[in-house]
Amino acid sequence: MIYLQKFFTVLALVRIIILSITSFFLIQGILEIPVVHLPFWLNLSLLMCVLHIGVSFIRFTIYKNSTFAYPSLFLLFWVLFIKSANFEIFLIDNTFRTQTLFSAVTLAIIAIYLYQNLRRSFRAIAKFKLDSRLTIILSFLLVIMLGTGLLVLPISSAVPGSNISLIDAFFTACSAVCVTGLIVIDTAIQFSRFGQIVILVLIQIGSLGLVTITSVFVNLIGQNLSVRSQLSAKDAFGAQEGDYSLVQFLQFVLGFTLAVELIIAIILFGRFITQMSFTDAVFFSVFHAISAFCNAGFSLFSDSFVQYRNDVWVNFALMSAIVIGGMGFAVWQDIKRYFEQKTVKLRLQSLIALRVSLVLIVIGTVLFWILENNNILFGMSLKEKFLSSLFASVNLRTAGFNSVDISESNQASRFMSVLLMYIGASPGSTGGGIKTTTFMIILATISQTVTHNNDIIIYGRRVAGSIVFQAWTLIFNSMIWITGTTLLICAIEPFSLSDALYETVSAYATVGVSTGITPFLGTFSKILIAITMILGRVGPTTVMLALIGRTAKKSLIRTPIEDLPIG
């Protein structure tokens, strides 16, 4: 009986995935897919509905308390109505108003159906008692799968009658969900407005995390979060125990995100409205505001922001969004608490994020200016050089926009860029990299070794030894993956070591800046870079702990200490 229950659960999950994709294909057929393709998707949806009703009847017979599949039954009747009403006539002869109404009704029915099944499936998944870290990983993979299914649809392609290849759709979905920004095809030209909206939604979900959105949704419908869900949400943002409950923290995250994105969108709209139509200006403003705050780096301009490198308005709007998003939600909550309660000090995480970020931005700006002054900055005015250097320094940390041609940068500048990308943003932010806290712990460890101190001290606070071990473990794991990936790309692709290293670090740190080799990667290399983006987003240590589990045992027996020569 237990195995039968598991079989039904797995079958329900498979059914949801298939029906999610086929349902959108159904809507796609209503809008653009030729009529000859529609019966296939109708028949497949019909078959899945019949299968669900059959399984539901068996469960209802065996388990008397099981709920019958009324949503599937209703969807079955609707699909039968479509077939009996000769839906092809609706596509060809009816007015646009009829098609719109028909599409809206179908979409509403499918949405209700998916909602009922997803809620049931989430309850089934909760019974498996997954590790909180594994929950985060699975949530990212789920969104990537759904995003790939949407981007591969013909409606996502800007070229009529064609669709994005599966590997390119998968790569783009990974890049969007992992808020990286690496692209194998031009987002501005080869994706339709529908495809661009899908990418935008994936960016927003990827930055906040599916666990967070699900947690807020559960609270909105009046249900309580499980302890495991709370742990997942805290792990996703690196939140510490404080004066705020998890629900209050998540509300702050959503409110803060929407407020910043709205302000940046309004600022960008003031510039874009002078150069394009009203609707385009609105969409471009919202898209780039979200992309900047989420540190994603996706742009609707084929040259990113090269055409705006002399525009102070656009540059500082984007840089402000990038820096704010890269600080971390816990940091901004801590700053809010600091101003509300004057007696409270900023946490160590906040101090490191603020100070290290400022220092890295200044150093990056100066070094980029010096190293590229006679190269890609040559011939620019003093204002352009400053804006381009500052914009590059901010974006190389984790955002991915560019206002100069990075492919023309010299080797010294690339090495500096790799270091900035590797360090990345701050914990619990929309950015990637090893994070500013890890970088500061490494520096403090080196200082402690030189000065022979017993403790790791940062800004007058002592760091626990377990945190130091985690930092070095992260460095070691990331170095192994980056090295192995770089060597593999060099072995199978005709690219230089610097290009391969730059691409790999950019993917791992979820930056999105490239020397221009991304569109020319082979299928295996694209998959490798996509995996690197996922690994960099969730963290190699998180993946390792999720796979092996945290089963540390405390031994009462202490073995003898023996010195070892180092170096």
Image (cartoon, helix red, strand yellow):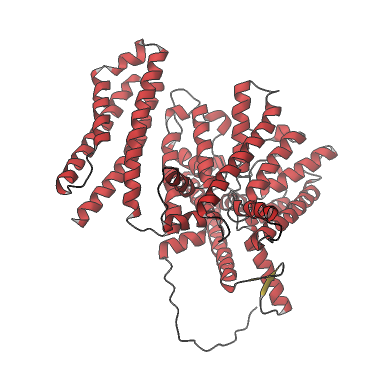
Relative image position of residue 516 (x, y in whole percent): 62, 41
Q: Residue at x 20, y 42 (%)?
A: 55
Relative image position of residue 481 (x, y in whole percent): 53, 59
Q: Residue at x 52, y 30 (%)?
A: 191
Relative image position of residue 366 (x, y in whole percent): 79, 51
Q: Identify which residue, 411 or 357, lies in the foreground.
A: 357
Q: Residue at x 17, y 41 (%)?
A: 57
Is residue 342 toward the left or the right of residue 162 in the image? right
- Looking at the rendered structure, the number of numbered marks drawn on it comes to 0
> In the image as oriented, which residue stretches furthest toward the left?
61
Relative image position of residue 11 (x, y in whole percent): 26, 46
In the rendered view of the protein, which quadrant contains the C terminus? bottom right
Is residue 120 toward the left or the right of residue 338 in the image? left
Query: Compared with residue 520, is residue 559 higher up or lower down, i.e. above or below?
Result: below
Q: Quadrant of residue 383?
A: top right
In the rendered view of the protein, which quadrant contains the N terminus? bottom left
Q: Identify which residue, 309 or 517, lies in the foreground.
A: 309
Q: Identify which residue, 200 or 181, lies in the foreground.
A: 200
Is residue 363 toward the left or the right of residue 223 in the image? right
Residue 178 seen in the figure? no
Query: Compared with residue 84, is residue 241 higher up or lower down, i.e. above or below?
Result: below
> In the image as oriented, which residue stretches furthest toward the bottom?
560
Residue 261 seen in the figure? yes
Query: Compared with residue 274, is residue 173 higher up or lower down, i.e. above or below?
Result: below
